[in-house]
Image: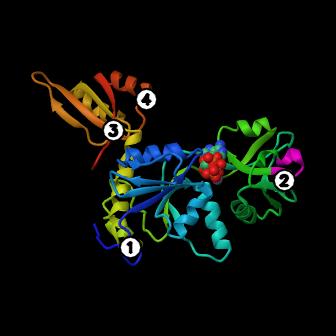
Amino acid sequence: MNPKTGNGARDRLRIAIQKSGRLAEPARALLTACGLSWRESRDRLFCYGESLPVDLLLVRDDDIPGLIRDGVCDLGVVGRNVLLEQDIALKAGGGSEAFREWRPLGFGGCRLAIAVPETWAWQSQAQLAGTRLATSYPAILRQWLDGQGIAAEVVELSGSVEIAPRLGQADAICDLVSSGATLAANQLKPVMTLLESEAVLAGPSSATSGASGLDQATPRQPAFDGIWDDARAGLAELLLRRLDGVLRMRHSKLLMFQASREAIPSLLPLLPDAEAPTVMQIDGGDGLALQALCHGAVTWQRLEELKRAGARGLLVLPVEGMLA
Ligand code: ATP
Ligand code: ZN
């Protein structure tokens, strides 16, 4: 650890997450799975890291990109939709890139879509020409409209976008959709997807954060050199390594079974996205015991296929963690 604390150097990493809302609990759960714990009281805005010098700032999601840009926070958990909207707006205002997505996190999934009244006979986006579109994502929508060469009016609303057509404020909308139930309740139907979104880990843009995944040979230590030359570089490195492990393990299973030696060639191709299995000889006979870490979905159907191909005593176990 760099003991230096003067000249803006910090010996703690600060992560902004949503205080309350859709991303608040999953963000905490993910960071907890990475081994972080905090001294906290729920109503406070700041959680002091106990297991590691990694603190949390609890804020509105819309504030997260700005907090990273201003260096108030080092990292943040925020929807890709919010990050992209503010990135486009920043650049449109003459600013340069200040933050970007470091990792997709696999929760908070939704899409930013254009929805029109159910009564419209939808054929193509050309129908949007000359319409008024209500949205809380004016920068993304404007960029998309310009890219498509569609001249339409963007009506910026901060909330309740889905009722804008009924109130006569707009003809159609551009809003986040997950199940589509809200749209249906407002007699709207989604017709175009502008962005597939989920929660992401956001950080300063100058990091060469492309070295993701445990299996990459690229040394990742230098990735943070240009951003932080204090203890935060090492902390971010540690956190990302754990995060990659947690994300990779989330859907992984350990598959154990027995089989005869002759069945192995037909069994191996059936293992879903598996790492090289461990093979052990069972005392006496030609029986083998195998265990394979599978990153693909281990479905019932796949287990039945394995059984038909000669696997016996199939056992599927969850994986809690992994350090390559
Ligand atoms: P805040 O008080 O922090 O500003 P908010 O009302 O803007 O909260 P939420 O509604 O909690 O935010 O949504 C946070 C994020 O959750 C969205 O930016 C988006 O990335 C994601 N999300 C997932 N599904 C949906 C959905 N159906 N509608 C809105 N956001 C969704
Ligand atoms: Zn918000």
Residue 257, above or below 132: above
Residue 229, horizontal then vertical, whole percent: 36, 73
Mark 1 vs ligand 1: CB under 8 Å? no
Residue 51, horizontal then vertical, whole percent: 32, 51
Name the residue carrying label 1: 9
Crowd band around label 1 with a 10 angstrom C-alpha radius: few (<14), some (14–19), many (20+): some
**Which residue occupies 58% across, 55% down?**
80
**Secondary structure under the numbered disc 4 in the rendered image:** loop
User: In the picture, residue 298 is in which quadrant?
Assistant: top left
For marks 4 and 1 on the same chain, the one whose residue lies earlier in the sequence: 1
Q: Nearer the viewer, mark 1 or mark 3?
A: 1
Q: Amino acid at mark 4?
A: Thr
Q: Is residue 49 left or right of residue 196?
A: left
Residue 245, horizontal then vertical, whole percent: 35, 48
**Secondary structure under the numbered disc 1 in the rendered image:** loop
Q: Which mark is residue 299?
A: 4
